[in-house]
Image (cartoon, helix red, strand yellow):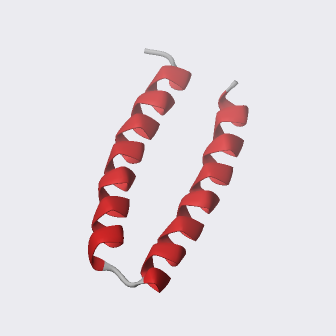
Amino acid sequence: MSRKQEFIQAVTHLEKSLANALNAVSQTGTPENVENFTKLMIKKEIILSTLLDEIK
């Protein structure tokens, strides 16, 4: 498996876990919790995009 494929597999696992976490936060958290989690997910997208560029 190439580095890019391993990275994509890891990101897929991460995304599934984050989707579950977002679901939990949105059901039990305050609006502030949801907002903070959403901000973290946006930062994660920026970081993952940069990492993917490095792998190419």
Q: How many marks?
A: 0
Q: Quadrant of the N terminus?
A: top left
**Where is residue 10 drawn, in percent x and y?**
41, 37
Is 22 displayed left or right of 53 in the figure?
A: left
- The residue lying at 39 percent from left, 84 percent from top is 30
**Residue 13 to residue 4: above or below:** below
- The residue lying at 72 percent from left, 34 percent from top is 53
**Residue 55 to residue 45: above or below:** above
Is 21 displayed left or right of 9 in the figure?
A: left
Instruction: Name the residue furthest top.
Output: 1
Q: Quadrant of the C terminus?
A: top right
Judge by depth and name the residue closer to the eye, 4 or 21.
Answer: 21
Judge by depth and name the residue closer to the eye, 33 or 10.
Answer: 33
- The residue lying at 48 percent from left, 29 percent from top is 8
Judge by depth and name the residue closer to the eye, 4 or 42.
Answer: 42
**Residue 44 to residue 38: above or below:** above
- The residue lying at 35 percent from left, 40 percent from top is 13
**Where is residue 19 drawn, in percent x and y?**
37, 52
Tell me where residue 6 sits by quadrant.
Answer: top left
Judge by depth and name the residue closer to the eye, 49 or 41.
Answer: 41
**Where is residue 54 drawn, in percent x and y?**
71, 35
